[in-house]
Amino acid sequence: MNEKDMGTDLEKVLISKEEIDLKLAELAAEIDRDYAGKDLLIVGVLKGAVMVMADLARALSSDVTMDWMAVSSYGAGTKSSGVVRILKDLDTDIAGRDVLIVEDIIDSGLTLSWLLSNLSSRGPASLRVCTLLRKPEAAKVDIDVTYIGFDIPNEFVVGYGLDYAEKYRNLPFVGTLAPHVYGG
Ligand code: 5GP
Ligand code: MG
Ligand code: MG
């Protein structure tokens, strides 16, 4: 799907496919360096992180293993509550493993901070976070995010894994929606 196929739903492209590719190549080079000689497990948080995982994993030179978790944040509306339920747990025992969580976006940071405490209780050798996007709220929360793609403005974005009502995940870029899509 390209920009044209989105018709009038799209307001603007915030980050192009080319910018995403370049950034993931940079992050992959850092990760390759940082985990040289280690047996890294990358953990994608479904569904949003599917695209980042697929492209980041292929940009890495090192062999990694990949696993997935699906979580759902309780709470009405669009805000995360911080109360999280595991819909799909890891298949891997991460005790003693070097683990890197791969996220699409960090907004309030509540989901991620729950995930970090849950996974760290399983005794990994190390636990770090890589996210493609980070919003301003998250920068205020005290979570250590080692690898950050882009700091973006406080706007609702879609594409490259991110949805609005389960749509737009397959856009190859990150963009914002026109107000009429929200019923505006
Ligand atoms: P947090 O717990 O950090 O507030 O929420 C993170 C989750 O909220 C993301 O994994 C994503 O599912 C959703 N989210 C936060 N901001 C956006 C956004 O701008 N667009 C979309 N599509 N989802 C978002
Ligand atoms: Mg996510
Ligand atoms: Mg969503």
Image (cartoon, helix red, strand yellow):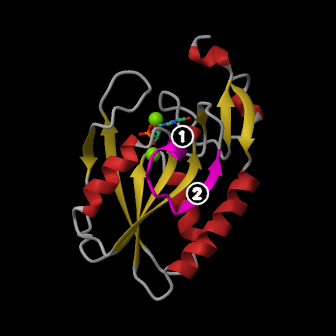
**Is the C-beta of the residue carrying label 1 under 8 Å from the nearest atom of ligand 1?**
yes
Q: List the single residue furthest toward the bottom.
A: 37
Of residues 108 and 142, the one nearer the viewer is: 142
Q: Which of the two discs, 2 and 1, labels the residue nearer the N terminus?
A: 2
Q: Is residue 106 visible?
A: no
Residue 116: image quadrant is bottom left
Residue type of the residue flagged with mark 1:
Leu
15 horizontally vs 162: left or right: right
Which stretch appears magenta?
137-151
Indicate whether 87 appears above or below 98.
Answer: above
Residue type of the residue flagged with mark 2:
Ile
Q: Residue at the spot x=53%, y=68% of the render?
A: 57
Where residue 101 sits in the image (x, y, percent)? 42, 60
Q: Residue at the spot x=53%, y=38% of the render?
A: 137
> What secondary structure is found at the residue carrying circle 1?
loop
Residue hosting label 1 = 162
Q: Which quarter shows the N terminus?
A: top right
Q: Quadrant of ligand 2?
A: top left
Whether the magenta-drawn stretch holds residue 174 is answered as no
120 horizontally vs 147: left or right: left
Whether the magenta-drawn stretch holds residue 139 is answered as yes
6 horizontally vs 76: left or right: right
Indicate whether 36 appears above or below 171.
Answer: below
> What secondary structure is found at the residue carrying circle 2?
strand
Q: Which quarter shows the C terminus?
A: top right
